[in-house]
Image (cartoon, rainbow, N blue to C red):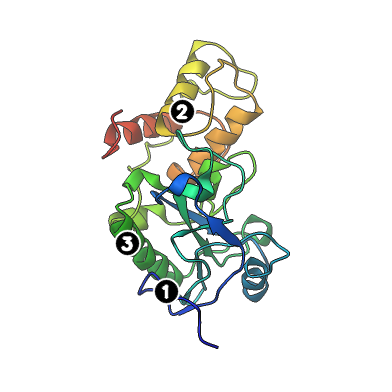
Amino acid sequence: MTSPWRADSPVAAEVLPSPNHAERREDRRPDMLLLHYTGMPRTDEALAWLCDPASSVSCHYFVFEDGRVVQLVPEARRAWHAGAGSWREDGDINSCSIGVEIANPGHDGGLPPFPAPQIAAVTALGRDIVSRWSIPRERVLAHSDVAPGRKQDPGERFPWADLYRAGVGHWVQPAPIRDGRALGPGDSGAEVEAAQALLAQYGYGIAPSGLFDAATAAVVTAFQRHFRPERVDGIADPSTLATLRALIAARPSVAG
């Protein structure tokens, strides 16, 4: 059966249309690339779910373990992949983003490594998308970045540094883990408020309150999954905070 539309990216091998999409609200132009894992045991079931009208979920692209890429929703349309979340001034992530689902059973399935052919395909697809849409490096994000209280994907085993070296995403070498003053659940005061302010400055949806609550721990955990994956524990230790400051200082298109 011939597809009613052509793939936007030459990296996509074919189009497999999902009915789950709508117009981008307020005529938003996509300026974010959001990466997910499927989080289901079977790849075929994950793809079928994204194309099932009963699921009310979808994505723009789906990347198989062997590196094959299919497009499910036109890039001009609002795919339903992010759910509730926020980043900087954006509260409707679906309207401002292009979503890529990467076949992987996720944390519930042991978070197996992402195969090299799959990462090569994600990298090639990402480079094409960010080039065509002029997406800033710091707006290539994890699902867990925009929804830290709900999501963990694509997880701490995803090779963000490799994508960065290929021109996709934002990254600095994580600061070494060392002893020192660490902030965690139950802490309060100016140091906690300053850490929350730094996270908000980078883009995370957190309001500085001075109280290290569960929401703060979730944001710190999300930050670590993406930018300091050696230890993911939700504790704002010196390494985490130093890495965060370095990322803010290194943002290429947003004043720190």
Name the amino acid type tagged 1: Ala
Dots 2, 1 in contact, CB < 8 A: no
Q: Is the residue 126 above or below the residue 5 in the image? A: above
What residue is at 42 percent from the left and 56 percent from the top? 159
Classify 236 as above or below 127: above
Identify the residue at image location x=63%, y=66%. Answer: 50
The residue mark sitting in front, 2 or 1, is 1
Q: Amino acid at mark 3?
A: Arg
Cα gap from disc 2 to disc 1, whole angstroms: 36 Å
Q: Is residue 229 visible?
A: no
Circle 1 or circle 3, nearest the eye: 1
Helix, strand or loop at disc 2? Answer: helix
Mark 1 secondary-structure assignment: loop
Q: Which label's residue is closer to the chain start, 2 or 1?
A: 1
Identify the residue position indicated by label 2 in the image: 200
Residue under label 3, please give it. 127
Q: Percent from the top left, x then y, of residue 254?
A: 30, 34
Q: Between disc 2 and disc 3, whose residue precedes?
A: 3
Q: Quadrant of the C terminus?
A: top left
Q: Residue furthest right?
A: 54
Q: Position of residue 194 (x, y in %)?
A: 45, 18
How far apart in space, not on screen, are marks 1 and 3 (Cα)?
Answer: 16 Å
180 horizontally vs 155: left or right:
left
Residue 176 in picture, x, y percent from top left: 39, 37
Dividing the picture into quadrants, the one containing residue 211 is top right
Compare residues 175 and 43 and report the one nearer the observer: 43
Real-space Cα separation, disc 2 to disc 3, in angstroms? 27 Å
Residue designated by label 1: 7
Residue sitting at x 52%, y 19%: 208
Q: Nearer the viewer, residue 171 or 98?
A: 98
Name the amino acid type tagged 2: Ala
